[in-house]
Amino acid sequence: MFARRTASLLAGGTLALAATVLNAGQAAAAATSLPCDIYGAAGTACVAAHSTTRALYSSYNGPLYQLKRASDGAVANVGLLAAGGYANAAAQDSFCTGTTCVITVIYDQSPRHNDLFVEPAGAAGPANSGVPADALPVTAGGHAVYGASFSGRMGYRHTSAAGVAVNGQAEGMYMVTSGTHVNNRCCFDYGNAEVSIADTGNGHMDAINFGTECWFSPCAGQGPWVQADLENGLFQSDAGPSKNSAYTGNAAPFVTALLKNNGQNFFATKDGNAQSGGLATRYAGPEPAQPGYSPMQQEGSIVLGTGGDNSNGSIGSFFEGVMTSGLPTDAADNAVQANVVSVGYGGPSPVAGGTLNPGSTISLRATTACCTTRYIRHQFDDAVTSVVSSGSSALDKNDASWIVRRGLANPSCVSFESRNYPGDFLRHYNYRLLRRPMDGSAAFRADATFCPQAGKNGQGTSFASFNYPDRFLRHYDNTVYIASNGGPDTFDATASWADDVSWAVNAPWAP
C-alpha cells in the first residue's frame, strides 16, 4: 500500500524526471501507532498525511518531500531513516551542499497520493514559491529534521484531491505549527479549499487557520488563535467572534491546531502545546448561521500556507498535518496529541552542548573584564547582553541559548538559531544584531553567517561577519553589533575592541 515513489507528478499532471529517494540504512525508532494508525483504527481514515519531519503511519517508508537544487535544477526526494521513523535530514544536507534548495513537493503518505505542489497564481495572489528547505531546522524524536517555514508568497496546493470531503461530508484535520512565527495577514491555512483557487462562496472551505488575524471582533488577547477558515471568515464560533474570553491565543514554540466539522450542523476547534499536555477545546457547536455554512459546500482541494483564493501574505510554520474522512472522535484526537507530544519537537539535540559543532546548543559569554556575567540574548527581537545566572528565569535562560547550525551562506562557518524561537536566527541589519526568521534570501543567509576565529584578546572565540569580514560580533553598551576595529560609528571604537569581540563558548543555559 505504501510503495515508494520514484517519480513525481507535476502540478499540470505530466510525469517528471524520476527523482532519487534519499534514504539511509541507519535505524530510527518508530512508534507502533502513529496519527494515521490512530485515526484509522477509530474509523476515520486519513485521506491526506503531510510532514517534512516524520512518518505518520507506522508502516510508511516512502519519501516525505522533494527538493530542487538551485545550482543545477536537480531534484531529489528526502525519505526516512527507517519505516515509521524520522526524516533523513543528513541526505538533504548532502544534496544541498554548496548551494540552496527549496521544497517543491510535500508528499501525501496516505494511499490517496494527495501530494502538495507549489501553488500557482489564484484570484487573490500571484504564483507562490516553495519554502527554503533549510529555514526551519528542529529536533524531533532526537533526530535533526527540517520543518517548512513560510515567509509570504509561499504555498502549496492539490486541486481535486481524492477522498477529501465535498458537499457537506464530515472531516477532521490537525497540523503541528508554531506560535512564534505568525502574522495578521491572510491566510496561514491547512485543509479543504476551492478547486478553482478563487473565493466561490460561504462554506466552500474547511481549513485550519493559525495566526493573529482577527476577522470577527472581538478577539481575546493577542493570539495567535486556532480558527476555522470556512471561507469569507475566520471563525472562532458560530457567530464569528470568540465566545471564550480566556482564550487569548497560543504562542508556544510548537502548537497542535485541530479542526473538525460534520459538514451539516457542527464544527469544533482545539489546540494544545505540541511539547506537553493535552488539547483544549476552544469551540464546539453549531455551524455559522449565515447562508452557505449549514450544510457546508466543500470542494475537496487541499491548501497549505495560503487562503483558498491564494491570499498569500501570511507567514507560518508547518511540521506535520493530516486530514480524515469522517468526524474523528475526541478520544482519537487525544491519542494523536499524545503521540505528537511523544515526538519531542524542539528537544535537546543529541550533539553535546557547549561546542561550535552543528547541532550543539551554546551560550555566548562576554570576556571583557567588566562584563563576564553577561551573555548574548534576544529581547524584543534585538540582540543584547544581559546578566544570566542560575537564579535567572527560564525565559532569560532560553533567550540566552543558541543552537549552532552550519553557516547559512557557508557551511565552513556557523549560524545561530534561537533556542525558543524555531527558525529564527541572529542576523545583522545596519550593523546591529537582531533575531529574525530565516526567509531563504541570499542577503539573509549572508547576514546570519559568522566565521569563528581565535579570540582577539587571546580568550575564547571571535566571530567575523561572513559578508563584512573585517567586522566581528561585539557588545557595546550592552547591545550587539558587527564592529570594525576603528571606524565612523561609536560601536567601532578601538578601546577594548579586542576584549569586546571575544566570546566564551559555554554550555547552554537552556539545553
Image (tube, rainbow, N blue to C red):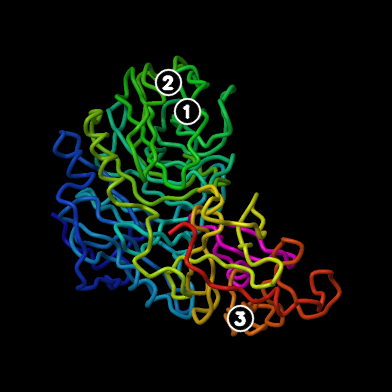
Q: Earlier in the sequence, mark 3 or mark 1?
A: 1
Q: Nearer the viewer, mark 3 or mark 1?
A: 3
- Residue 146 picture location, percent across and down: 40, 61
Q: Earlier in the sequence, mark 2 or mark 3?
A: 2
Callout 2 crowding tier (Cα within 10 Å): few <14, some 14–19, many ≥20: some
Q: Residue furthest right?
A: 488
For the magenta stretch, what is the residue range?
A: 422-447
User: Dots 1 and 2: beta carbons under 8 Å?
Assistant: yes
Above or below, 259 relative to 442: above
Above or below, 509 relative to 404: above
Q: CA distance from mark 1 to mark 2?
A: 7 Å
Above or below, 387 relative to 264: below
Q: CA distance from mark 2 to mark 3?
A: 68 Å
| Residue identifier under label 1 | 201
- Residue 313 picture location, percent across and down: 58, 46
- Residue 327 picture location, percent across and down: 25, 29
User: Callout 2: helix, strand or loop?
Assistant: loop
Quadrant (top left, top right, bottom left, bottom right) of the N terminus: bottom left
Q: Residue at x 53, y 54 (%)?
A: 397
